[in-house]
Image (spheres, rainbow, N blue to C red):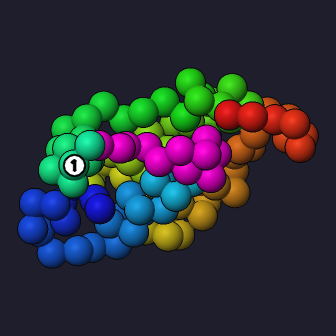
Amino acid sequence: MAPEQILGKPPAPDVDIYSLGCSFFELLTGKLPYSGGTINDLLAKHLTGPIPSVTARNKNVTEDMAELLRMMLAKKADSRPKNAKDLYVALKGIRILKRKPSPNDVF
């Protein structure tokens, strides 16, 4: 859940960008970006927790992709890509992984 949703603000397209960033993070690391012992702990991390480093959990992710994920997971909606087209252009222009993963790769 994006920080602005937790605060009760009306949803906008950047909410989907945040959610997709969480999905990309999990896809690239095998872990959710945030976890908590209770739902309140989890929501607090989405609101104020530091944005986790994807490259700390998967060294094969490029710095460009890591930066895009940081933008997608920004706490402030106006710091995220504005819409799906902007995100598509950003993704199209970067390399996601440094090398082709092998079946033996573990995060």
Res 83 seen here: yes
Crowding near pointer 1: few (<14 within 10 Å), some, many (20+)? Answer: few
Q: Residue at x 15, y 75 (%)?
A: 10
Tell me if residue 28 is in the magenta stretch: yes
* Magenta region, residue range: 26-36
User: Which residue shows up at 68% across the image and 34% down it?
Assistant: 107
| Left or right: 74 in relation to 107 | left
In the picture provided, is 77 more to the left or to the right than 71?
left
46 relative to 66, above or below: below
In-front residue for pair 6/32: 32
Residue behind mark 1: 38
In the rendered image, the residue lying farthest to the front is 37
Q: Position of residue 100 (x, y in %)?
A: 88, 41
Q: Is residue 21 above or below residue 103?
A: below
Q: Residue 42: image x %, image y %?
A: 25, 48
Q: Give residue 6's position: percent from left, percent from top.
A: 16, 61
Q: How many discs appear? A: 1
The residue lying at 60 percent from left, 64 percent from top is 88
| Residue located at (41% from left, 62% from top) | 19
